[in-house]
Amino acid sequence: MVYAVVRAGGRQEKVEVGSIITVDRLSAEAKKAVTLAPVLFVDGDTVTHDKKELAKVTVTAEVLEDLRGPKIVIQKFKNKSGYKKRQGFRAELTKLKVTNIAKK
């Protein structure tokens, strides 16, 4: 069993070949390959977390699409003072499919 934990968009994701992940928006076009930075690499019983050894590991993924997350509504209210504030937010996201995890 081969998998890696990669740093993607301020978070860490556990990925295997063929897995689809959603990360913060990347500046890459659809159907292009991107490289993700590994934090941990597991190959069977061997666990690698040393920086020098991780420099030899490459995790590549293909950009499937750019999308937007669900709308989050932020409301603030203070009783008896007439203060109301309403604000919305939608995250800009990118969907990736991991194509290769290799060690040189």
Image (spheres, rainbow, N blue to C red):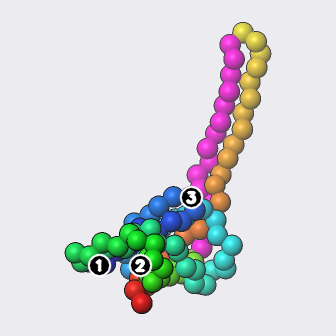
Which image quarter is the C terminus in? bottom left
Q: Tell me if residue 47 is in the magenta stretch.
A: no
> Mark 2 or mark 1: which comes first in sequence?
1
Identify which amino acid the numbered label 3 is placed on: Gly
**Magenta span dominant secondary structure:** strand
User: Badge 2 is on which residue?
Assistant: 53
Residue occupying image coordinates x 44% and y 68%: 39
Residue occupying image coordinates x 41% and y 78%: 53
User: Badge 3 is on which residue?
Assistant: 10
User: Badge 1 is on which residue?
Assistant: 43
> Mark 1 or mark 3: which comes first in sequence?
3
Q: Is mark 1 on a helix, strand or loop?
A: strand
Find residue 2 and report its horizontal and vertical position in percent. 31, 78
Identify which amino acid the numbered label 1 is placed on: Asp
Q: Tell me if residue 74 is in the magenta stretch.
A: yes
Boundaries of the magenta span: 65-79
> Mark 3 or mark 2: which comes first in sequence?
3
Residue occupying image coordinates x 68% and y 27%: 76
Q: Is mark 3 on a helix, strand or loop?
A: loop
Crowdedness near tag 1: few (<14), some (14–19) or many (≥20) residues, C-alpha within 10 Å: few
Which image quarter is the N terminus in? bottom left
Residue 28, by quadrant, is bottom right
